[in-house]
Amino acid sequence: MGDETRRAADGRWVFDGVSYPTRSEMCRTRRERYVASLNARLNFTQADRAVDVSKCIGKVWRNEHTRATGRNEKPSVDWYRSPVNKPTKLHNATSTRPNAF
């Protein structure tokens, strides 16, 4: 880690051989590449290594976390949303189960 991301001598941020004027643009590109790696069926650790971030930062990008500074990072992708509608709970009066009394 550390070889792909660095600050160039002229003060620009470099990620994967591309120079960015600000750190936020570089980080946005890294997050997009991270999501693309996950969509390409890489596991979390492989995607972390592909964009040169720690597993902790990868988890922050996958899940919504509030940082110590108060900055709230939204998840990149809605990972845990179920594609199937969840059934609603039946009311006791409409239940077909016989009473146990």
Image (cartoon, rainbow, N blue to C red):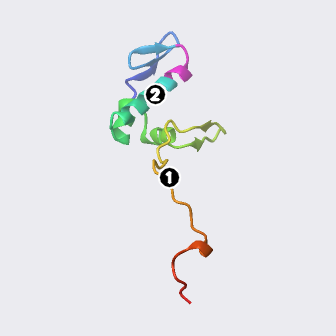
Q: Nearer the viewer, residue 6 or 67?
A: 67
Tell me where residue 21 sits by quadrant: top right
Amino acid type shown at disc 1: Asn
Quarter containing the C terminus:
bottom right
Q: Nearer the viewer, residue 94 or 16?
A: 94
Q: Where are the magenta residues, as a range?
A: 21-26
Q: Give residue 67's position: percent from left, percent from top.
A: 61, 40
- Residue beneath the point at 38% across and 15% down: 17
Q: Is residue 12 left or right of residue 91?
A: left
Q: Can you identify the residue that label 1 sits on?
A: 85
Residue 18 drawn above or below residue 29:
above
Residue 77 among magenta residues: no
- Residue beneath the point at 47% across and 30% down: 31
Q: Is residue 42 left or right of residue 68?
A: left
Q: Nearer the viewer, residue 29 or 70?
A: 29
- Secondary structure, mark 2, is helix
Amino acid type shown at disc 2: Glu
